[in-house]
Image (cartoon, helix red, strand yellow):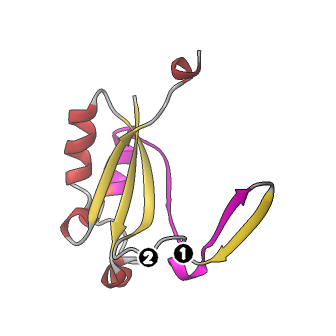
Amino acid sequence: MQYLLMICGDETAEEHAYDGCGGWSEDMERRGKIRGGGGLRPPTEATTIRVRDGEVLLTDGPFTEAKEQIGGFVILDCADLDEALELAARHPAASYGSIEVRPMLGPEDFA
C-alpha cells in the first residue's frame, strides 16, 4: 500500500529546507520504498484556487493561516501502516516539525 508523508513545520523549519534528509532518502531509495516526492516552495509563493457558484476565486498565499505548513512530501510503498510510521519516524523532519502519514487511495477504491 502507498502512504503519503506530508512533511510539516513552522517558519523556523525553512532553515532545514536545504539540509537534505541526512541519508534517509538514499536509504529509502535503496530499499525500494520511495515512489515519489519533493520539496515545496514557501507558502508565500502559493496561489489558492476555489470555485464557488461557477466563479473562480484566487487567493495569493495559503487559504488558511496556520503555524505549520507543508514543506514537502514523500510517497512510500509499505506493507502496512506500522511500517509507514516506522519509516516516517526516522525522517529528520520528525525531529523539528511533524509528519502526517496518510494512506493513499488505490484503484480498488474506485471500483
Which segment did they paint magenta? 25-52
User: Magenta span has 39?
Assistant: yes
The residue most toward the front is: 53
Residue 25 drawn at (x, y percent) = 36, 55
| Amino acid found under the numbered disc labelled 1 | Arg
User: In the rendered view, would you say 11 is above or below 89?
Assistant: below
| Amino acid found under the numbered disc labelled 2 | Glu
Q: Residue at x 58, y 21 (%)?
A: 110
The numbered mark, 2 or 1, whose residue comes first in the sequence reads 1
Of residues 44 and 55, the one nearer the viewer is 55
Look at the numbered disc 2 and give the secondary structure of its residue. Answer: loop
Apparent side of residue 109 relative to residue 26 in the rendered image (left or right): right
Distance of mark 2 from mark 1, alpha carbons? 16 Å
Q: Residue at x 26, y 50 (%)?
A: 88
Q: Which residue is mark 1?
A: 41
Q: Residue at x 80, y 55 (%)?
A: 54
The residue most toward the right is: 54
Residue 91 drawn at (x, y percent) = 26, 58
Of residues 10 and 91, the one nearer the viewer is 10
Identify the disc placed on residue 65. 2
Residue 75 drawn at (x, y percent) = 44, 45
Apparent side of residue 110 relative to residue 52 in the rendered image (left or right): left
Of residues 27 and 72, the one nearer the viewer is 72
Q: Tell me the crowding category of disc 2: few under 14, some 14 to 19, or many 20 or more residues within 10 angstroms, Cα based.
A: few
